[in-house]
Image (spheres, grey):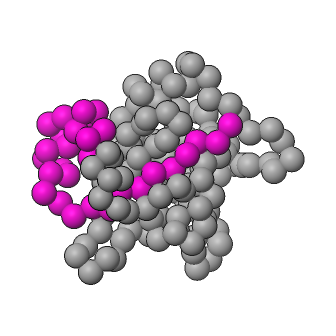
Amino acid sequence: MNPPTPLFMHQCHVNILAPRERITSMDNKAIFGSSNLYLTTIGRKTGSKHQVEIWFAYDAPHLYFLAHSNQSGSMTDWCNNLQRYDKCWVRIHKRCFECRAVAIGGKPLEEKARSLFKKKYQAAYHALYEGTHRLAVQIRVLG
């Protein structure tokens, strides 16, 4: 995977006075066809924006992620950031959408996320996610 482009923050700048982008039927097709997206969160310590390229599953209007987590509950930075600030953005291709974290963790959420990931990524899911400790995250695409 290619590293995120540093210009992303400017490309995905959110003007709170401007109307947010709406998901169109073409966006839905693009989202379903994409294997990854760029997730931008607000740093829980710095307040600055942080971006990761990440695999996801989509069940409109929600995106699902499986965050690295260990048995003691330590999680990836982006997941910790979402626990502090639920506002985030996703970029798929050249479209950017404002989102809100809806749920983090829980058995029903993990089962749904894993089911969607298995369907989408198939053999890659089994190689990378099967039997690993992950925390499911659900975000809602606004607009």
**Closer to the camera, 134 or 51?**
134
43 over 61 or under it: above or below: below
The segment highlighted magenta reads 114-143
Q: Give coordinates of residue 9: x percent, y percent.
A: 65, 52
125 over 32 or under it: above or below: below
Q: Give coordinates of residue 35: x percent, y percent.
A: 36, 35
Check residue 136 for magenta coloring: yes
Q: How many marks?
A: 0
Q: Is residue 93 left or right of residue 79?
A: right
Which residue reaches farthest right?
17
Q: Is residue 9 left or right of residue 54?
A: right
Q: Residue at x 61, y 34 (%)?
A: 95
Classify residue 85 by image quadrant.
Answer: bottom right
Q: Quadrant of the C terminus?
A: top right
Q: Give coordinates of residue 84: x percent, y percent.
A: 57, 72
Q: Is residue 67 visible?
A: no
37 over 45 or under it: above or below: above
Which residue reaches farthest top?
26
Q: Quadrant of the N terminus?
A: top left
101 over 12 or under it: above or below: below
Q: Give coordinates of residue 114: x percent, y percent.
A: 26, 46
Q: Residue at x 36, y 53 (%)?
A: 109
Q: Is residue 80 visible?
A: yes
**Closer to the camera, 80 or 116?**
116
Which residue reaches farthest front?
108
Q: Residue at x 65, y 72 (%)?
A: 47
Q: Residue at x 53, y 36 (%)?
A: 61
Q: Is residue 137 left or right of residue 41?
A: left
Q: Is residue 125 left or right of residue 117?
A: left
Classify residue 133 by image quadrant.
Answer: bottom left
Check residue 10 for magenta coloring: no
